[in-house]
Amino acid sequence: MKHIYNLLAVVILSISLTACHNELGLEQSKILIGDENSSSIDVFTYTTRMLILKGGTGKYKSNVNNSKLATVNINEDTLRITGILEGKTYASIWSGDECRKLNINIIVPNITSTKDIIRLFPRDENRSISINGGGSLAKMEVEDPMNILKKVKWNAKTNIIELDTYCEGDAYLHIVGENNQTKTIKVEVRCKGETNGLGAYSTTSRSLSELYRNTLVVHRKGVGTWICNEANPTTSKKTIKITPAIINPQKGSFIEAKLSLSYPDEFSSIKDGKYKLYIQDVKERYVVLVGRGFKLIIPYEKR
């Protein structure tokens, strides 16, 4: 009987030792990062991405190799990675004896805009165009050779471009990102309405209007053009002389021209002097020249 008891004790002890051994020898499950068990991740600067952790012991801790480029923290099973500066680093994630390495690529987000071409009228105020991306150091460079914009500002808090226009013409907004990526937005300011033929027109109002009564347009070959408000140029009180003669104009380019006024005091929106005029259009018999606040439609020469 005593022998039987001793045998049972040995069996029970063997079972206990085997169970203990199995418990101690259980293989700890590997750490899984995100739904795709990622080994690397892309993060935009100043943007946070979150990944769910699985495996290990269920308790996690982390560290980032370069805290100047990104920050990493864990809340229960959620890994949060926030990009700071463009570059590459990695995070180490521990759970018990298990450790995983996650490569982090911090990139500057691409520049995007709600519109690539902004079409407005003179004296419009626009607050509807949004610019995003390019990083926190992105900047806006304004190309406005005709000085058609009264105000242009990029509000960094709202990402909204604030535009106030003055007259007809074209301007360009160049958005330059941290990594030198560039996006260009064109601002087209146009009056409503059509011209009545050759002459001088005002472009500072929503509707196109004559700068004065375009009664007579005279072109002298090799010299220039006169726009008069009377049929007799010698008695006209409002005459603009454009010199030199326009020869072989190219649409989209600029030319230098001199505007001479017969009676300067009779003009309020234009003065005597040299102007840099934009060639807005070229037709078979005439060219459209645009200055700040005015438009001239005159004959040109082909050579």
Image: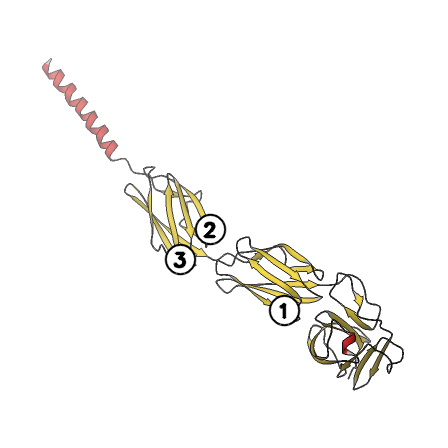
Question: Which residue is at a point 76% across and 78% down the rendered structure image?
Answer: 264
CA separation, marks 3 and 2? 15 Å
Vertical order, 76 against 162 (above or below): above
Q: Which residue is mark 3?
A: 88
Counting from the top left corner in percent of width and height, residue 67 is at 36, 54
- Mark with earlier residue (3, 1): 3
Q: Quadrant of residue 262?
A: bottom right
Q: In the drawing, does residue 269 fall left or right of residue 66?
A: right
Foreground residue, 34 or 112? 112
Q: Secondary structure at mark 2?
A: loop
Query: Dot 1 lies on which element?
Result: loop
Q: Amino acid at mark 3?
A: Lys
Label 2 belongs to which residue?
A: 47
In this rendering, which labeled residue sits more in front, label 2 or label 1?
A: 1
- Front position among marks 3 and 2: 2
Check disc 1 and report the residue beneath it.
Answer: 144
